[in-house]
Amino acid sequence: MRSSSTSIVTGLLFTFGLVLVGSLLTAALLSLTDIQERSLPYFTYAINIISLLIGGYVTGRRCGGRGWYYGGLTGLVYFLLVLLIGFLGFDAPVSLITLVYLFAAFLIAAIGGIFGVNSTIKR
């Protein structure tokens, strides 16, 4: 069982790394194929969902207990960092739908954390 803060940071690094790789693959896919840019939101949602699941999984596996809690915190911190970047860097407005996205990020990463804790072998 590792420290919860280092586990959350590790999960966040996995999440951001996967988002970066997924974004690069999506950019290559858009430029090299006939896929239209109007399908970009679907790619964005899929990349974020998969990244949050894996980030929560890594956090839950490293913590060894309370996976839903630590995985959910990973999703919460990820969302708040993305919100901060969007708000400060791109002047993105904060609205009611923001709370839905916050809850979804917490829930998805918490599910990943549950799977992560349950994948560890108890001795």
Image (tube, helix red, strand yellow):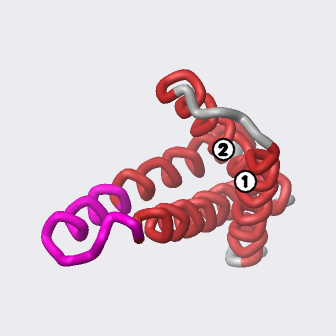
Q: Which residue is mark 2?
A: 79
Residue depicted at 63% across the width and 36% down the height = 83
Residue 24 position, x and y percent, is: 28, 57
- For marks 1 and 2, give the one nearer the viewer: 1
The kind of residue tagged 2 is Phe
Residue 65 position, x and y percent, is: 83, 60
- Range shown magenta: 22-38
Residue depicted at 48% across the width and 63% down the height = 41
Residue depicted at 72% across the width and 75% down the height = 115
**The magenta stretch spans residue 62:** no
**The magenta stretch spans residue 31:** yes
Local packing at callout 1 (Cα closer than 10 Å; few below 14, some 14-19, many 20+) is few
CA distance for labels 1 and 2: 8 Å
Q: Is residue 121 visible?
A: no
Is the residue 98 above or below the residue 46 in the image? above
Are discs 1 and 2 less than 8 Å apart at CB?
Answer: yes
- Tag 2 or tag 1, which sits nearer the N-term? 2
Along the line of sight, the residue nearer the viewer: 75 or 13: 75
Taking the image as shown, residue 29 lies to the left or right of residue 16, namely left
Q: Which residue is mark 1?
A: 101
Local packing at callout 2 (Cα closer than 10 Å; few below 14, some 14-19, many 20+) is many
Residue 104 position, x and y percent, is: 75, 60
Taking the image as shown, residue 46 lies to the left or right of residue 36, namely right
- Residue 69: numbered disc: none
The C terminus, quarter of image: bottom right
